[in-house]
Image (cartoon, helix red, strand yellow):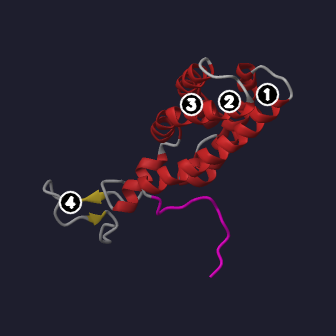
Amino acid sequence: IHRPFTGAQPDVTPIRELFRFAVVGTVGFATEAAVVFALIGWGMEPHAVRLISFPVAVCATWWLNRIWTFASGKEASPRQQLTLYFGVQVIAIGVNIAVYSAILSTIAPTPTNALAALAAGSIAGMGINFLGSRRFVFVGGEARSADAAGVGHERKGHERKGDERGGDERASDGREGL
């Protein structure tokens, strides 16, 4: 049965989120790398290049994470979500730029060396990006993952009832709990 892609994937576990986040990060890295490589090749200063490449990559990864990585991403206002996402990215880019700059201070700033420094900086910032995105930007991701696992997530109209020991749980509408 062919179903059109809607972006919402209710069965996404935290491990799948991390995998998808890494895939999106790879796309973001490739996007930024192309901009860095081209602009340095055209004679721009390697640090100034990041002022252009970074926002381009942030917009690309926000959109992909919104529609694919974090299934609940479409629930929030795009403007508010992009603002929060950009804030998380700014924090992580501090680590990214520090690593990038440290490496470039020890080697010649050729386009190839700049890409190696970019890769190292990107890896250093990934953990901050994932945790910040999952906990502050795409907040529905944790609730959705808990629901998929059948763990303590309450949905409107289906509040769980049970004794304090976690015994026989039934939804408030009389159906058995998920």
Mark 4 → mark 3, Cα distance in angstroms: 48 Å
Q: Residues within 10 Å of mark 1 (few under 14, many from 20)?
A: some
Tags 4 and 2 in contact by the CB under 8 Å rule?
no
- For marks 1 and 3 on the same chain, the one whose residue lies earlier in the sequence: 1
Asked if marks 1 and 2 touch (Cβ < 8 Å), the reply is: yes
From this viewpoint, is residue 155 visible?
no
Residue furthest to the left in view is 165
Q: Say if mark 1 contacts mark 4, CB within 8 Å.
A: no
The residue wearing badge 3 is 121
Task: Give the residue pinned by disc 1.
Answer: 40
Spot occupied by residue 50 in the image (x, y as percentages of width and height): 71, 25
User: Which residue is depicted at the point 77% across and 19% down?
Assistant: 45
Q: Residue at (63%, 40%) from the top-left corner?
A: 77
Q: Residue 76 at what x, y percent from top left?
A: 59, 43
**Separation (CA) of disc 1 from disc 2:** 9 Å
Q: Amino acid at mark 4?
A: Gly
User: Does residue 5 belong to the magenta stretch?
Assistant: yes
| Disc on the earlier residue, 2 or 3 | 2
Task: Tell me which amino acid carries mark 1.
Answer: Ile
Of the residues tagged 1 and 4, which is closer to the observer?
1
Q: Nearer the viewer, residue 61 or 140?
A: 61
Q: Is residue 122 magenta?
A: no
Circle 4 is placed at which residue position?
A: 162
Q: Which contiguous range is marked in magenta?
A: 1-12
Q: Residue furthest top?
A: 105
Reading the image, the residue beneath label 2 is: 114
